[in-house]
Amino acid sequence: MNIEQTVSTAVQELALGSAFSFDELVSALQERRNRTLRIIELVDLGDHDGICAVWLITDSEDLVLHAHSDSVLHRQQFVLHEFAHMILGHGDDDDYFVDDFLLPDIPPHTRRRLLARQDLDSESEVAAESLADRLAAAIRGSAFTKSRYLEIFG
Ligand SMILES: [Zn+2]
């Protein structure tokens, strides 16, 4: 399957339609993974560190830690990229175990994946970025639908 197909299939499997809100996506992911999903901003982590977001799998939760960015859209993109890895099942590969240099306060067994978005050379990174773009478009579509609704009926 090529990346385009992989991404389209993943979007279809979400069964959220072509436009959905960020919150609807989070709910769908929690339900699908049967775990709590928490999104946390790491104030100390900046874009310049080359790492924009990290997905950690603990016994009961998925944690997405992301760098601060003044742009809401950037932040959303960091987080959606990690969601994309979740949706594509990338966290199930054990070769993603990572070092702990960034996260001294988090116990080792909770560390699972650490992702540098700049590292887009592998196929899974390209797929994740592509899926993140599709999710962002769907979320924009949802915002547009709602604002149109308000324009007409609000
Ligand atoms: Zn990635």
Image (cartoon, rainbow, N blue to C red):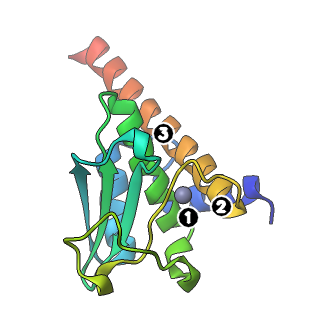
Q: Residue at x 32, y 34 (%)?
A: 69
Let me know if residue 15 appears in the view.
Answer: no
Q: Residue at x 46, y 31 (%)?
A: 141
For the residues marked 2 and 1, what is the alpha-carbon distance in whole angstroms?
Answer: 6 Å
| Pointer 2 residue | 9
For marks 3 and 1 on the same chain, the one whose residue lies earlier in the sequence:
1
| Pointer 3 residue | 136
* In the foreground, 9 or 97: 97
For the residues marked 3 and 1, what is the alpha-carbon distance in whole angstroms?
Answer: 16 Å
| Pointer 1 residue | 13
Q: Callout 2: few (<14), some (14-19), or many (20+) C-alpha neighbours within 10 Å?
A: few
Q: Callout 3: few (<14), some (14-19), or many (20+) C-alpha neighbours within 10 Å?
A: many
The residue at the far top in this view is: 151
Q: Residue at x 70, y 61 (%)?
A: 122
Amino acid type, callout 3: Ala
The N terminus - image quarter = bottom right
- Image-quadrant location for residue 5: bottom right
The spot of residue 34 in percent (x, y) is 31, 78
